[in-house]
């Protein structure tokens, strides 16, 4: 492992996001402007947007989702940044996290003092089958998708390999969904911000209102095993094991650490970054871990000079429930083959020893793929500053982590955050 | 994907032709042109025997376009006897009978049809080996 270091300190001084959901009347620029306005309002001491020097924008596929390429200058123009450089970053679902990393490098290099990092995706305009095809193209389109693999299919194959090796059951995965919906229920920005018990109650009430026979689930488990309410997508993954299709945008303002106090007395410092790549699934030896995530986090821990034990909370890439289980092991929070037990025992709950995805995660908050990596950081920003409202984790949060994955783990990017003083 | 791209991959789709590194002997499917083990660029075609065991699988209920007629279908990762993993559909078996670790062999089957003319693309799938190994 090479120990790398940043040329100088980098801090987050502003953060904002659009509501996540399905918005037929909004374009991606509407969503981006919404996020930018909230970011601007979040800067405690105010600022003049004229001082922004460049934009890095995470966006997976506006070309296929919206028939609009060359998205970065469009977003820069929408918020009045032209003629400053605007760069689109594409690493599938890690586009946002990688955009953040490039923003960090740009500040750390000394070239820029003030950098806007954004992410946006407008996905719900396409029919679901075409969204499936578009997401599938983040895999190998010569050998994986022609076999009939879908994105849920890839992660389902990881899940069956994991179940076979470690004795996990689909019920363990359900505990991840139950937790993330419970968290998302407290996040006003979440697309499906409803706990599963409340979801069940809403379904019962809707049936009664229509004069139809009400479902008779006796428990959450009953509901989650109901093939009509929670259909199988790719065994063992059901609908509630999958993140939704989402429209949304997110924005962060990064500055040189030495200038952070011009903007706020509560900056959040980025002290560790790591990124790695990997081949498609057929070239891997083990489907129960993502090598890229392990390499990325080792680099990030080494740079930050911290270990997994020091991390108080984390937002990890739960595009599917199995992905969260594997992520909590890849981040070294738990030993291989034990992450599913930790989820079931409540260790990763908001009041547990290692709260994971307090925002609701991609699962409940929503997954506008190019924006997700940036939105993860917004949750960390809110939690570390004590601004997470009803879902605020109790106690001090000196160190936190985000883990953002592209495709089936061909890209992984990790950031480590510190609240100083 | 257009038909021409499938045709260009006919050696892979019909015969499981990958590559072998002439320097270190590492075998690859899909074929690589640079050896990821020793970084040699001296690789030769290598035809795999088409037998192996099931490493992992799933049953797809929500298919990508072009695969609707097969739903629900089983896709898996097959670990070939020579080492590489292949992603392919598992056929001629009830989903309930699929087991990780079972022996499978390659067969040539319809992958999908294209367009109004229904042009068929064929390629490899794998089925359980009933007798022998």
Image (cartoon, coloured by chain):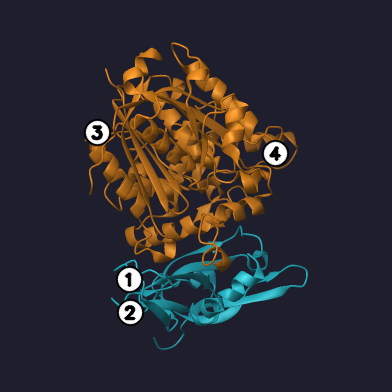
Q: CA distance from mark 1 to mark 4?
A: 65 Å
- Name the foreground residue: A176 vs B119: B119
Q: CA distance from mark 2 to mark 4?
A: 67 Å
Chain under disc 2: B
* Same subunit, tags 1 and 4: no
Give the x, y percent position of residue A405. 43, 46
Can you tell which mark lies on residue A310? 3
Task: Determine whether the residue tagged by mark 4 lies in a helix, strand or loop.
Answer: helix
Q: CA distance from mark 2 to mark 1?
A: 8 Å
Q: CA distance from mark 3 to mark 4?
A: 48 Å
Can you tell which mark lies on residue A207? 4
The reply to whether dot 2 and dot 1 touch (C-beta < 8 Å) is yes
Chain under disc 3: A
A94 up-or-down from B110: above or below: above
Chain under disc 4: A
Q: Residue at x 65, y 71 (%)?
A: B3
Residue A266 can be seen, yes or no: no
Q: CA distance from mark 3 to mark 1?
A: 42 Å
Q: Colour of chain A?
A: orange
Give the x, y percent position of residue A316. 40, 40
Task: Determine whether the residue tagged by mark 1 lies in a helix, strand or loop.
Answer: loop
Of marks 3 and 4, which one's residue comes earlier in the chain?
A: 4
Q: Residue at x 23, y 47 (%)?
A: A2
The reply to whether dot 2 and dot 3 touch (C-beta < 8 Å) is no
Q: Nearer the viewer, mark 3 or mark 1?
A: 1
**Which residue does the numbered mark 1 point to in the structure image?**
B40
- Chain letter for the part of the structure drawn in cyan: B
Label 2 neighbourhood size at 10 Å, few (<14), some (14-19), many (20+)? some
């Amino acid at each position: 492992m090479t120990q790398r270091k940043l040329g100088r300190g980098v801090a987050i001084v502003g953060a904002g996001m659009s509501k996540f959901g399905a918005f037929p009347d909004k374009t991606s620029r509407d969503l981006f402007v919404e996020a930018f306005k909230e970011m601007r309002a979040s800067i405690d001491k105010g600022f003049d947007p004229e001082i922004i020097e460049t934009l890095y924008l995470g966006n997976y596929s506006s070309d296929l989702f919206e028939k609009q390429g060359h998205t970065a200058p469009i977003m820069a123009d929408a918020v009045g940044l032209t003629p400053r450089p605007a760069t689109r970053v594409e690493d599938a679902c890690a586009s946002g996290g990688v955009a953040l990393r490039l923003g960090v490098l740009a500040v750390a290099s000394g070239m820029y003092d003030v950098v806007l990092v954004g992410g946006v995706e407008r996905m719900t305009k396409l029919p679901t089958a075409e969204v499936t095809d578009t997401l599938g193209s983040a895999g190998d389109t010569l050998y994986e998708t022609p076999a009939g693999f879908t994105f849920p299919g890839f992660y389902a194959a990881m899940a069956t390999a994991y179940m076979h090796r470690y004795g996990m059951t689909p019920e363990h995965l359900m505990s991840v969904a139950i937790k993330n919906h419970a968290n998302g229920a407290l996040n006003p920005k979440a697309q499906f911000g409803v706990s599963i018990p409340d979801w069940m109650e809403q379904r019962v009430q809707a049936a009664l209102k229509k004069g139809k026979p009400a479902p008779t689930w006796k428990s959450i488990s009953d509901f989650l095993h109901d093939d009509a309410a929670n259909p199988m997508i790719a065994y063992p993954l059901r609908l509630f094991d999958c993140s939704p299709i989402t429209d949304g945008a997110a924005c962060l303002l990064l500055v040189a650490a030495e200038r952070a106090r011009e903007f706020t007395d509560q900056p959040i410092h980025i002290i560790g970054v790591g990124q790695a790549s990997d081949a498609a699934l057929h070239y891997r030896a083990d489907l129960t871990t993502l090598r890229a995530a392990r390499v990325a986090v080792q680099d990030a821990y080494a740079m930050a000079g911290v270990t997994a034990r020091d991390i108080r909370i984390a937002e990890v890439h739960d595009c599917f429930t199995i992905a969260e289980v594997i992520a909590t092991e890849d981040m070294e929070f738990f030993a291989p083959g034990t992450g599913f037990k930790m989820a079931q025992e409540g260790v990763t709950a908001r009041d547990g020893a290692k709260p994971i995805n307090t925002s609701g995660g991609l699962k409940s908050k929503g997954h506008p793929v190019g924006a997700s990596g940036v939105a993860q950081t917004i949750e960390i920003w809110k939690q570390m500053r004590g601004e997470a409202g009803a879902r605020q984790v109790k106690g001090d949060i000196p160190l936190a982590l985000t883990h953002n994955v592209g495709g089936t783990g061909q890209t992984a990017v990790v950031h480590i955050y510190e609240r100083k003083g | 994907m257009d038909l021409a791209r499938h045709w260009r991959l006919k050696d892979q789709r019909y015969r499981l032709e990958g590559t072998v590194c002439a320097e270190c002997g590492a075998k690859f499917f899909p074929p690589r042109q640079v050896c990821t083990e020793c970084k040699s660029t001296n690789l030769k075609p290598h035809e795999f025997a088409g037998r192996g065991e099931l490493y992992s699988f799933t049953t797809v209920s929500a298919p990508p376009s072009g695969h609707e007629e097969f739903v629900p279908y089983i896709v898996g990762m097959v670990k070939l006897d020579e080492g590489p993993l292949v992603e392919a559909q598992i056929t001629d078996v009830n989903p309930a009978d699929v087991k990780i670790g079972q022996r499978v062999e390659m067969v040539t089957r319809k992958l999908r049809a294209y367009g109004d003319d229904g042009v068929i693309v064929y390629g490899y799938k794998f089925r359980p080996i009933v007798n022998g190994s």
